[in-house]
Amino acid sequence: MTNEFVAIFELVKNSFDAGATRVDIEFDPDESSIAIVDDGQGMSAADIRDKWLFVAYSEKALAGPENYRDRIRPAGQFAGSKGIGRFACDTLGSSLDLYSRTRGSSKISKLEIDWTLFEKDSKEEFQAVDVTLGDALEFPEIHNASVPIEHGTVLLIKDTRHHWDEVTIKKLRKDLAKLIDPFGTTKNVVVSTWLADGDETQVEGVDGPVGNQIADLLQDKTSRIDVVIHSGMVETTLFDRGRRIYSIKEPSPYEDLGDSRVQGNIYFLNRAAKHNFTVQMGVRPVEFGSVFLFLNGFRIFPIGEELDDTLGLNRRKQQGQSRYLGTRDLIGRVDVTARPKMFREVSSRDAGLVDDARSRALYDAIKRHMIFRLERYVVGVNWKDKRDQDRDTAEGLETDSARERILSIVGGLARSKDVEIVYYDPDIVRVSDDPDQITDNTLKSIAEVAESNGDTALLGQIEDARRRIDELRASREEAREVAQRAIEERQRADARIERLEQQAAFLGSSRDVNVERVQLLMHQATIHLGHVRSAIANVSHELRNVLASASAPEDGLDIDDFEDLLASIRQSARRASASIAGANLSGERLRTVLSFAPNIRVDLQTDKVRGDLLKFFGEYFEVRLAGVPGMPTATFDAAGLSLHREFSPVDVAVLIDNLQDNARKARAKHIEFKASRKGQGPVIISVTDDGVGIDERKVDTAKIFERGYSGSTNGTGLGLYTVRQIIQDMGGTIELVGDGTRADFEIVIPGGDA
């Protein structure tokens, strides 16, 4: 930072020290002047004479004329030093008129200084240089700022030593914003800059208040932790993409921080957040800084600067790139409010705080209760999902696997005897609607949270889940026994069922139907019927909850009770919708099994097989989709490619059938599936048809894959949702491509083994 920028910053901080609520800085190139106006407490003539002029001047008097201004060094290194305001004024211009009025005074004190008189002999004592200190009738007129009314100060710096134009002022504003308040969260002091160029039109980025919108930019776009350490307690709230995950409080282990208040707001920057930051702010986050430290409102340097590692985060990250956060992953601020001299800066003003018990406790608190706690969430939840790096919304938290990871974090907090869980997200800390997704560890974590908070409703969910799991296990055991008997029979009949002709890998003629296939079909049917039965039980349970909630008390409901009732009904409706979607998928699977089980050549005892997925596509189109009445003709072009991986034949059949049925609804005559691949990348399957496409007046294309959304009045909103779920289970994606009016899709499926 240049010396003239530091000089401006020091004068602004003087206004802060004077209790100002506004500071206006006006540059007038035509007059070669700078005016700095504030509404602080002001100075009397005695204050100007005894404090502003004649305190700690020995440093300047001993400096030579060639370098004494260089003692104003970059980065505000002598904030609070006596006499620095005079140094700053001298750095900016050859002369100064200072006007000031204190509260309740009718007088305006005026000081006039010609710095060139002092420069004639640098060894002459400052006290020997003539200055004029008297009264003024009024404050000077400033073009863009209102002069103080009851109290305040105006510094009119004349014969400026530097050229100030739009480019320079824009650079100054960036540094001011970063030095005064990197996050634009300070509301009690407004700092503005103005360029007096004769044009009343404000120039964007030059005229008006200085500030950043980083807090607004990141607030709901990434994970963050808010921590307050005060009065012997640590209060913590963690957010992820705008969702409050949990709030806790616990006793503070930091006795050396007992007389202070420490507040931290730390953000994790994933790839999407870093991109948004760079686009919006015009600078990469790593160049802007990391975690800044403020003491009683002022920056402590160099903490938070690009190359600073005061907290040792980068040294620690070198020990495990995938386990730890470094300064490049974080941005934030820590504000410390403390009595004078409780924390001391080193004398050079650019090396942080003096190393003592209090500063060590502060750094330890920032690491342990802010950064490391955020790190446990990011590493344990966000980094487990590779696609999360490119998300700036909370949609990834809705999956059962993400919820299980979050439950592990919250459950760990619940196990700590000193931690009180004040809040947790009830849509995340709950029992899954799908018994297949409930693990013993998940139930254990939920139980720990429920017992810690005495949440009887959540404990009831746990018991209900255990009942559903027992029912599902019983159904599967019954199916396993049936399947085992079928396997034994198949082994005895292996020699009989070998065919003389070459057979397809997956599908063949239905003439081969025998008792073995029927028994295996029973196995699959029993499993899917069990899922449907469990889903129906879940829906019935949620409907009973809604009916129970809707039974209003005899004395009626007040507005708060009514809002709570609506929230409860909405939550039950969401869970019921999820169960219905699960039942629909199980029904689709059962229908598919019933339709092509006579042809299938894979083991129906298991859900998945390993083989060439594209070969299965081709055989399914040839055997099952050829000449189906009322459906568009369907073709598949593998383009000579293969894709060896694990997949579920039933799910792939459901996927193809749903897309073909969508084409039928669009009055298509033909639908084509075509495979392609770039290099060794994933396989891309393009799906196109000649139907009527999408009417954007009736259909929101951004929602077509959402559960329950349908573009037609008689649709279920589950077809494309089911397709996406199946593809995502294979680690792939599906997108609507084209101009938005065609119902063309692009499916990307990664490979498995080579």
Image (cartoon, helix red, strand yellow):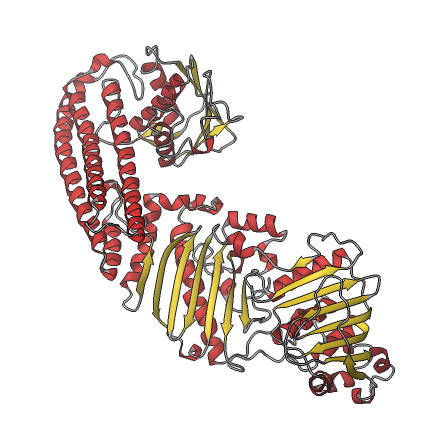
Residue 248: image location, x then y, percent: 35, 63
Residue 539 vs 652, above or below: the answer is below
Residue 165: image location, x then y, percent: 78, 58
- Residue at 75 percent across and 56 percent down: it is 167
Q: Is residue 25 left or right of residue 618?
A: right
> Which quarter of the rendered picture does the N terminus lie within?
bottom right
Frontmost residue, 744 versus 118: 118
Quadrant location of residue 80?
Answer: bottom right
- Numbered disc total: 0
> Which quarter of the rendered picture does the C terminus lie within?
top left
Q: Is residue 232 left or right of residue 678?
A: left
Q: Is residue 61 left or right of residue 536?
A: right
- Residue at 21 percent across and 47 percent down: it is 552
Residue 473: image location, x then y, percent: 16, 40
Q: Is residue 221 visible?
A: yes
Q: Is residue 358 left or right of residue 484?
A: right
Quadrant location of residue 386?
Answer: top left
Quadrant location of residue 586?
Answer: top left
- Residue at 66 percent across and 75 percent down: it is 151
Q: Is residue 172 visible?
A: no
Residue 546 vs 425, above or below: the answer is above
Residue 36: image location, x then y, percent: 72, 69
Frontmost residue, 94 versus 398: 94
